[in-house]
Image (cartoon, rainbow, N blue to C red):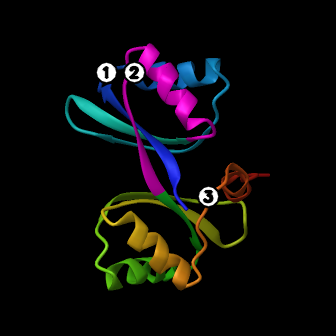
Amino acid sequence: MVVKQLSVFLENTPGRLRAVTSVLAENNINIRALTLADTSDFGVLRLIVDKPEMAVIILKEKNFTVKLADVIAVEMDDTPGGLDNVLEVLDAREVNIEYMYAFMGAKPKKALVIFRVDKLEEAVESLKAKGIRLIVTEEEAADLIYYCWD
């Protein structure tokens, strides 16, 4: 009930982000979600892609520092209190959230949240027990993420 996330350590210089996206594009790897957090000299690019194991191999071959980690992808209501409902479940089990990022999805009033937590199995159990939908397959993620702006 987890998805694989890539974390890529990047120098904070012009062109470094594109160097990663170019490698992924050249190898037909599709980005499903991403976030970039920076410090003054370096940043961490976190990515959900359709072929995570392949992406790690290819990025390492290109001398990027990359790590694969398990994260939880949760479908939540995109309404006031939607995130609070998910956080309440994690808080009740004293699950610490190391970081998270969220975005709207294609389904009406639904959003996708990616969580990195300290107690992965407890988080998955507690979310499932409360009927909160976890995203585990590429198809589920694609169905939730794609959005047409027309």
Residue 121: x and y, percent? 42, 67
Q: Label 1 sits on what residue type?
A: Thr
Say which residue appears at 57% left-offset and 25% top-offset: 24
Residue 110: x and y, percent? 64, 70
Instruction: Identify residue for label 1.
Output: 13
Q: Label 3 sits on what residue type?
A: Val
Classed neighbour count for the residue bearing mark 1: other residues with Cα under 10 Å, few (<14), some (14–19), many (≥20): few
Q: Is residue 69 magenta?
A: yes
Q: Label 2 sits on what residue type?
A: Arg
Residue 92: x and y, percent? 34, 85
Instruction: Identify residue for label 2.
Output: 16
Q: Nearer the viewer, residue 123 or 8?
A: 123
Q: Nearer the viewer, mark 2 or mark 3?
A: 3
Residue at mark 2 to residue at mark 3: CA–CA distance: 30 Å
* Residue that protrudes farthest toward the right in the picture: 150
Instruction: Identify residue for label 3.
Output: 136
Q: Earlier in the sequence, mark 2 or mark 3?
A: 2
Residue at mark 1 to residue at mark 2: CA–CA distance: 6 Å
For residue 2, above or below residue 53: below
Contact, mark 1 vs mark 2 (Cβ under 8 Å): yes
Say which residue appears at 63% left-offset and 20% top-offset: 27
Q: Which residues are magenta?
A: 49-71
Instruction: Check disc 2 and report its element: helix, strand or loop.
Output: helix
Q: Earlier in the sequence, mark 3 or mark 1?
A: 1
